Image (tube, coloured by chain):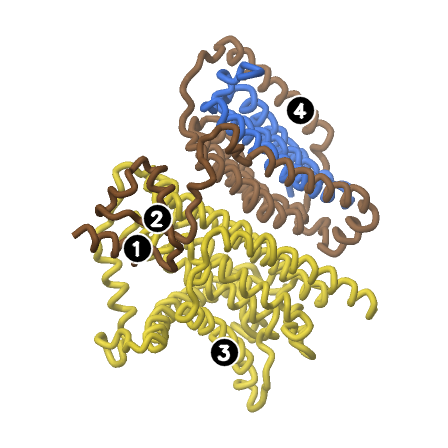
Chain colours: A blue, B brown, C yellow
Amino acid sequence: MIPLSYYLILSAILFCIGVAGFFFKRDIVSIFISIELMLNGVNLAFVAFSHALHSISGNLFVFFVMVVAAAEAAVGLAIIIAVVRARQTLNVDRMDLMKL
Amino acid sequence: MHPALFFIFGGIALAGAINLLVQRAPIYSALSLVAVMGALAVLFLLLGAEFIAFIQIIVYAGAIMVLFVFVIMLLNADVPEPTRRSKVAQAIGYPVMALLLVELAGFFAAAFGATPVRTGGYLVQVAAVGQALFHEFLLPFEVTSVLFLVGVTGAVLLAARREERHGAAPRATRVHAGVPTRAMAEALSVPPNAMGGAVIEPAPQPESEPAHARAQGDGR
Amino acid sequence: MSMPTGIFILISLIKCAIALFVLLTLVAYIQLAERKIVAHIQSRVGPNRVGPYGFLQPAADAIKFILKEEVTPAAAHKLLYLMAPMISVVVALVAISVVPIGGTFHLFGYPTQFQIADINIGLLFLLGVMSLGVYGIVLAGWSSNSKYSFLGSLRGGSQMVSYELALGLALIGPVMIAGSLDLRQIVQAQSHIWYIIPEFVAFCIYLTAAFAETNRIPFDLPEAEGELGAGYHTEYSSMKFAMFFLAEYVNMVTVSCVATLVFLGGWHGPVFGPPQLQLWLPVFWFCLKVGFFLFLYIWVRGTLPRFRYDQLMAFGWKFLVPLALANVLITGVVLSVMK
């Protein structure tokens, strides 16, 4: 028997690690991966609340988050490919020009 | 049973997340995230969300992260070259992150510390998810399908190589049925008659082997 | 379930051990059967030196695999190179755990099933675990740091991700009719009519996608030996190669089991005789149907040529997926009209 707060704290930790990765990683793919980690942390909180409140809405929110994450990954990775093709680098510090 | 499972898989998720942050090469970050997702799927099962747990595996681990690994492979993304990383930003950033975490954790512990979570306390049946999805949440569901269509179109448009503009790979080099054509030899910057001394006609052949064999035979 | 936890774990472990033993032996002999059958299709004799009719050939192969030298390429990513075959084989073996092969029997006085884990969304579990198999292939190709491996894994990854879609969509029709994702209930719902009859189109789509999913001829482009050496496992030797090999054949068994459960009525068949026979006959029918699918795999391998890669992708995305979607739509309309 464990309290709901354990799940929520775990989700907060995952989210914060995601935020830290987002700020401190230097290559664009890792930054994107950190965003996915944040989404996962939030999903855990949604499911935990859904369980505690006996409501199905939390589950459905997670479903929609996943769907949007899938679309986002498709578009985002396509953008990354296009950018890397144009700049020949993954490092976000080198992507500082609006125009080639 | 429930606390043990929570601490095992919560620990795995935590270790994966920290590894994600520590690793420099994106491929290891991506694989750590897959481990986090697997562990989270087990936690979802503990929370009675069966459908979400397996969708997590199918969609997140099986499709989205495969896409990530794929792109990392395609771009051959290795450890990025070090650029001037702001030490000040890190020195301030990590403590601020820790502070945010402590604050969140403190709030959660205070507000939900007494709410117990029990195995089987609330089980979401797949059928119930379907019912809710196609009645209560029908409009968002349909809107996401439009979103997907836009996403697919955008992805294809963005990732498609614009050949004519960059002029890197002219269309003629596309190989058909494995026949070594003149265009292919040119693309490899080999004179057309360098392969065994015979000119290889671009005539369509059912298999590539006879073409090679004949070329070599003529050369001798 | 009212049985004590200790007994439950004991029974599960026994079932795991039996399943592992049967599966590994089966894989070894499927491979022998494959060589024999393909040999006969091509008017050869096939392996016949080791034991009567080459019956001990699998043992010889196993000894060969174990005794060969392990070669790790100097430029490989060592950790991933080591992990890739393990991921493949673990994922393949885990998938089989939810496949039910018969009714209920008694062990230590407790009722239990011919199935390791009886979970109520078994089909989703299977799809989920199968979707993870692609990691083994992708990582193997990338970590070997060799162009043939890399090309093979790129092909394998995109092929498996694409055909998984058609595979999953093909299974939706039967799931809609049965109204459940529980493999046992799907089988029980077929006691009147096997779903191969109302869902014949879905069956064809499933079969095609399953061939692509397991990287078998005519869709074995990831390991096309004529053009890529051996594809993603070019750089693997000895037991690591054997693991990929094992994973491929276990995957074949898994998709055959799913085809049997979802389309061919699982363990349904004429049941008669004394109680002991009535217990084992369903298992026999199930194995017979799975055996038919495995034979089909080998038969197709002996007779069909390999697709070209662009043809494969175009076929998957432009033909199979729309057809599967149309099938789902028609099934839904028919079901709602009949209701």
> Residue drawn at (80%, 51%), measured in percent from left and top?
B134
Per the image, label 4 sits on a secondary structure element best described as helix
- Parent chain of label 2: B
User: Percent from the top left, x then y, of residue C49?
Assistant: 21, 75
Q: Which residue is mark 4?
A: B104
Residue position marked by numbered label 1 in the rendering: B211
Q: Are marks 4 and 2 on the same chain?
A: yes
The CA distance from mark 1 to mark 3 is: 46 Å
Labels 2 and 1: the sequence-earlier one = 2
Instruction: Name the residue: 56% across, 86% down.
Output: C275
Please give the chain letter of the residue carrying mark 1.
B
Outermost residue on the bottom side: it is: C273
Label 2 SS? loop
Viewer-nearest of discs 1 and 3: 1
For image coordinates 71% across by 49% down, the residue present is B121
At x 54%, y 42%, the residue is B9
Secondary structure at badge 3 equals helix
Give the numbered dot on residue C288. Answer: 3
Report the front residue among B43 and B196: B196
Residue A6 position in % (x across, y down): 63, 34
Q: Chain of mark 3?
A: C
Please identify, in this view, whether the residue under mark 3 or under mark 2 is nearer the observer.
2
Q: Nearer the viewer, mark 4 or mark 3?
A: 3
In the rendered image, the vertical position of residue C137 relative to residue C113, given as above or below: above
C163 over B77 or under it: above or below: below
Nearer to the camera, C339 or A56: C339
Q: Quadrant of residue C140?
A: top left
Other residues around mark 4 within 10 Å, as few (<14) / some (14–19) / many (≥20)? some
Marks 4 & 1 on one chain = yes
Q: How far is disc 4 from disc 2 in space, using C-alphas? A: 64 Å
What residue did someone put label 2 on? B180
